[in-house]
Amino acid sequence: MILSKKRWQVERPDATLVQALQNDLQLSAIAAKILAARGCETTAEAESLLNMTEANIHDPFLMHGMAEAVARIEQALENGEKILVYGDYDADGVTSTTVMLHVLLDLGADVSFKIPNRFIHGYGPHEALFREASEDGVQLIITVDNGISGIEPIRVAKELGMDVIVTDHHEPGEELPPADIILHPRIPEGQYPFGELAGVGVAFKLAHALYGELPSHLIEFVAIGTVADLVPLVDENRYLVKRGIQEMRRSLSPWVQAMCDIASTEQTKITEETIGFYFGPRLNAVGRLGEAAPGVELLMAEDNAKATALAKKLNACNTERKDIVKSITDEAIALIEADEKIGNSLVLVVAGEGWNAGVVGIVASRLVELYYRPTIVLSLDPEKGIAKGSARSIEGFHLYNELAKNRDILPHFGGHPMAAGMTLSLEHVDELRTRLDAQARACLTEEQLTPVVHIDIPLSIDEISADAIEEISTLGPFGTDFPKPVYVLEDVEIASMRKIGAGENHIKMEITNGYDKLDSVGFNKGHLHDELTYGIKVSFIGDLQINEWQGRKKAQFMIEDVQTTEWQLFDIRGIRQTARWLNTVPKDVARFIAFRPETMTYYQSLIGAPITLVDPALSNIEQSDYIVLLDLPHNVQKLEDVLQKTAPSRIYAHFYMPDSQYFSGLPTREQFAWYYKFLKNRPAFPLDMHIADLAKHTGWPLDTLKFMTQVFFELDFVKMESGLTTVNVNAPKQALTEAPSYKQRSEQIEMEQKLVYAPYIELKQWFDERLTSADE
């Protein structure tokens, strides 16, 4: 039995709908299941999603304030006014800034840009930067990906005589800033058809309106910011990202090739994952560590040399960011493990002096992955007496609402159910931990503290092929609100498995449904080789990939998690070198069981773990999930009794038998008859003196002669006095099988045949029958 550490929640798409999508759209079963699971309720809806066009792009003038914004910018262009594009330091802000710079430069504007420093200015409009802009003669500020909460700085800008156009997508507060124009997809609510644009999406709408036509050359930037900012990939976001990826694949922009080179990825194979794992993190990294301007400069670069140099700079920042994240994560883990007050809290609140505030959100995410508890990571500044940081949550703990209950000690915080940022006094850090722990204990159940994996695409092996996997890519992009599928293969069997890799820390399997087979690979899952056995039903979750080798494409399942509810038999019979089989046994949890004292003596020093010698009443045997059967008892009933008491989920069968009787077998009736006649014809025969010679004469093993003699003694057929044997001709007739020695040896041979020398499948069946009856 292997139970996952996560709760598997399997959802099954409607089978009738899946079949209809397959038939009507000529799709594979996998593609049809994905579309059904992603909310397509009709063939028409699925077809519309598969074939998005520019018609999916809404008229930018549907956004409130768009006509006024275009008029004000055109006025600035006509009058030669200085324009400042005021951005943000993350990937969405960098791409928003890039989009706005492109359109304004194309229209001949006198334009510059400014992105605040995360550590000096913080997020959003900053009064000092606006005052600098005024001194530089700026007459119009256009914010991108920020501004909706910049009430005071924008008021200052207005007092200084500058006009302000806010373009933003973040959640507005109760009070809006005193800007001249606000472009926001949710203000006023319901006017614009789609409210989930990223910041770069709003900037793109303004660019669209200014150009008078769709600026396809800017869509690649929209794709980056939209994916990186984790906004829903539905409606026009979906089209923008899909089209943006297509544009990137064929783009001649220097930044594209430079980023592909630095990330070691092929331009023609760019996907949403390329953006999410390679491009986005590098654009974010510069703003996390310092000035974000190099990100804009890279995207605006017009020659390859400059783009390459800037890409290398971003890459170096990303490497440094990774190192910082690892260092802080290691320190945070050490604090959690060392301090019970921190480690035992249901909400982890960890803090460190000098921790980089730009990466604590990433650290919080890592800790949630590790401990699966709501987590706050704070950077302490003793000089200012404040703690500043980020939080990440789990399902069931509404982070914003729970933080809001502590406004008296949290003067500055913001966020949503799963993530938040905050600033508080150093003296209130411990108090916040105590309060949040109490709040979590009041609302989180044990089940909610177990990580959940949502599985929405159950598959059968016969549905999986290289063609079907290639078709899946046409359903993308995958992301927020249109997540990448998580596949499950249920109740399949293992046809073969082996460890792979230099350190044998990976595993390769063939999985079968009894007819079809599927190659499967589990990276860093080599341990499964010692935890899974053949002949049981196993379920796997993971991803699908194509393995291409010498021009041949083959489907492959990438294992992420595994579980089986069946008990397992591990066959370690006949392995003489103890170290070879002992390495496959989890010694810390397994119970080693011996039936014979000599076995216990033999293995005590070799195993280095306690061995239970079964006592006659089985009083020292109790329930054990994992048992190692070192040898066999003298009768099979004793083993059956042990199985009933232990009720194991794993059995390691070794069955060490130095005195095996199986190959010696039982003497034949003819051998017994000859031996009886031999003794009868030789009254007072000195057997002890001549038994070895007799063995040589007959060619029988000496042990066989001794066994036959013991049977005769037990049945009173032969007596011995003073070393001389005499046949008792008056002994009552009895079957040889009545002799205790004969019975024991017969049982021993039968037991060895069934348990020691039987094929694996027969041994498994024998145990199956006993364990099943024990459950009834």
Image (tube, grey):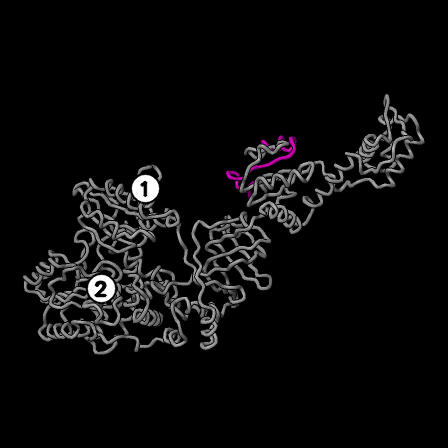
**3D distance between C-alphas at marks 1 and 2:** 35 Å
Q: Secondary structure at mark 2?
A: loop
Q: Residue furthest right?
A: 681
Of the numbered discs in the image, which one, if any, rests on residue 169?
A: 2
How packed mark 1 is, by other alpha carbons closer than 10 Å (few <14, some 14-19, many 20 or more), is some
The verdict on residue 705 being magenta is no
- Does the image show residue 434? yes
- At a point 34% along the width and 69% down the height, the residue shown is 245
Residue nearer the viewer, 177 or 286: 177
Q: Secondary structure at mark 1?
A: loop
The verdict on residue 583 being magenta is yes
Across and down, in percent, residue 648 comes to: 56, 43
| Region in magenta | 582-605
Height in image: 475 above or below 522? below
Q: Where, by quadrant of the figure, is residue 47 drawn? A: bottom left
Of badges 1 and 2, the one in the foreground is 1
- At a point 57% along the width and 40% down the height, the residue shown is 646
Height in image: 128 above or below 602? below
Q: Is residue 685 left or right of residue 599?
A: right
Question: Where is mark 1, residue-wise?
Answer: 345
